[in-house]
Structures are given as structure tokens and as C-alpha cells.
Image (spheres, rainbow, N blue to C red):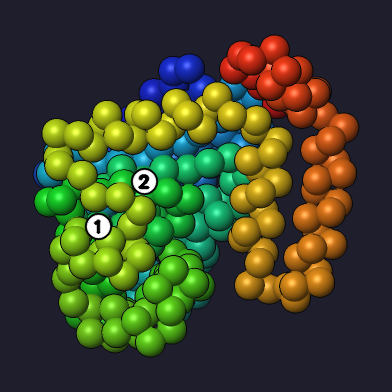
Amino acid sequence: MDSMLVERADGVVRCTLNRPEKKNAVTREMWLGLIDLFEAVAVSPDDRVLVITGAGDAFCAGADLADGGTADAATGVGSALAGMRVVGRAALALHDLAKPTIAAVNGVAAGAGLNLALGCDLIVASDQARFSEIFAKRGLAVDFGGSWVLPRLVGMHRAKELVLLADVIDAVEAERIGLVNRVVAPELLDETVSELATRLSNMAPLALAASKRLLNQSFAVSMAEAIDAENTAQALMSTTRDTAEAILAFFERREPHFRGS
């Protein structure tokens, strides 16, 4: 679709939200497109890393309230809930994706657009980026998984401050509180993200997926349960061809070539 551009090269899938005239606000069609994309990347052996960014001077201003991007009370509560379940499916599909994901935040990221970025494993932001959990100023509750992911990133009190006050913060503040991983000059954003994506695409896919799963479930398990899960994951990794290749490459003093098997 014209509103969402997808490019693939060398194991990296780059998705560009492409409605710059609307600050890349997401329509219902785009939510469905994102679900399809996340599910396709999940099962493709050739897709190793997903990068999400926005066209123009914005990452994503959130759901398009005028084009079915979120709940519409005019159609009734049942229809509004059905619409929000599409948004929720997109959030879960991104969260469940076992492969590394990177958000390249080039400008404003607000509402569901911010939480789309926060749903990624790594966030690299331009120093011109701005962030806001804008929902309260629109009379809405937080969505796209923000109520789950935000406290895990910045702590409960800081999460409540961001959501309840709905302030706009700049990239420096976002980095200071742990909302993003790196802040770079606008002209270095694509280069920095490409370098990270290339590094990840050349690493062992099964090992990355196992580690990502362990980290994602860490807040829901005890230390003993986490260690037991680590033991199982490590035992499984030791049986893979990628682990054998990594050990061989170490002794041969060369870079390993991982195949995801």
C-alpha cells in the first residue's frame, strides 16, 4: 500500500509509514498492514531484522482519529471495541515477533505512534524527535500496549507522569529517562540504524530469539524460574548448527556465518 512502504535487503526489512502530510498517522488499513507485515517477517527465514520509521519529518503521530485508526464511538461501543482489537492485534504481533526490531524515530512520536516505537527492541532517535503519550489530551486512555511496556522501561511513577500529564518531551529527556537507546544527529540516524540492523542480521537468529523471549518474560517469573528457562534455552542452543559454527569460527579466528539452524 502507498501509505506503508516495505523494503527488503540483506536480511533487513525496512517499513516506512508513508503519510507525511498526516505526520504518518495510522489508519485502519495500515494497522491491518502492520499485522500482516509482522506475521510475514515472523515466518520468513530470510527476514532477520525489522526496522520501522516514518516518512518526512515525523515518525508517527498515532492513530488517525478521522480515518478509522482507533475507536469510533459514533458507530457504537461494540464497533469501537472491534476497532481497538485490531490495534491490539498489531501491538501483540510486534511484541511476539521473535526477531530483533528497531525503531528509527526521525520526528514526533505520539500516542500509539510512540508506543509503536516502544514496542521495538531498540530505539534510535534523531535529536529533533519529540515524544508524547498524548492520549489524555484527546480524552482517551493509553493503548497499543503502552500500559504494559512503559512502566517496564521507565518505572511506574515516571510512566504515570508521562501518561497522565501527556507532556511532550524532547529526545535528550527521552534518553535520560531510558525511553530510547541512542540519540543522534538527524543526518546520522539512517547510518546508525543501518549499522545496528546489519550487526543484528549477521548474528545467530535462534540465539537472539531465545534471549529476547527470556528478557520479555523476565518480569513475570521468579529468579529460579528465569534460571530454569535459561538452562533450557542454553541446552537447546548448544544443539544448533549455529553454535557449532560459532565455536569453529572462534578457533579458526574468523567471523561466523549463521544460518538460523
How many angstroms separate mark 2 from mark 1 (CA)?
10 Å
Q: Secondary structure at mark 1?
A: strand
The residue to which callout 2 is attached is 103
Q: Residue at x 16, y 71 (%)?
A: 168
Tell me the amino acid under the disc marked 1. Ala
Residue closest to the eye, 51 or 65: 51
In this rendering, position of residue 24 left or right of residue 120: left
Q: Position of residue 113 (x, y in %)?
A: 31, 57
CB under 8 Å between discs 2 and 1: yes
Residue closest to the eye, 5 or 124: 124
Tell me the amino acid under the disc marked 2. Ala
Q: Residue at x 27, y 29 (%)?
A: 191
Q: Secondary structure at mark 2?
A: strand
Q: Residue at x 40, y 73 (%)?
A: 154
Task: Tell me if residue 243 comes above or below residue 160 in the rendering.
Answer: above
Q: Position of residue 9 (x, y in %)?
A: 44, 18
Residue closest to the eye, 189 or 144: 189
Residue closest to the eye, 219 or 118: 219
In this rendering, position of residue 117 left or right of residue 20: right
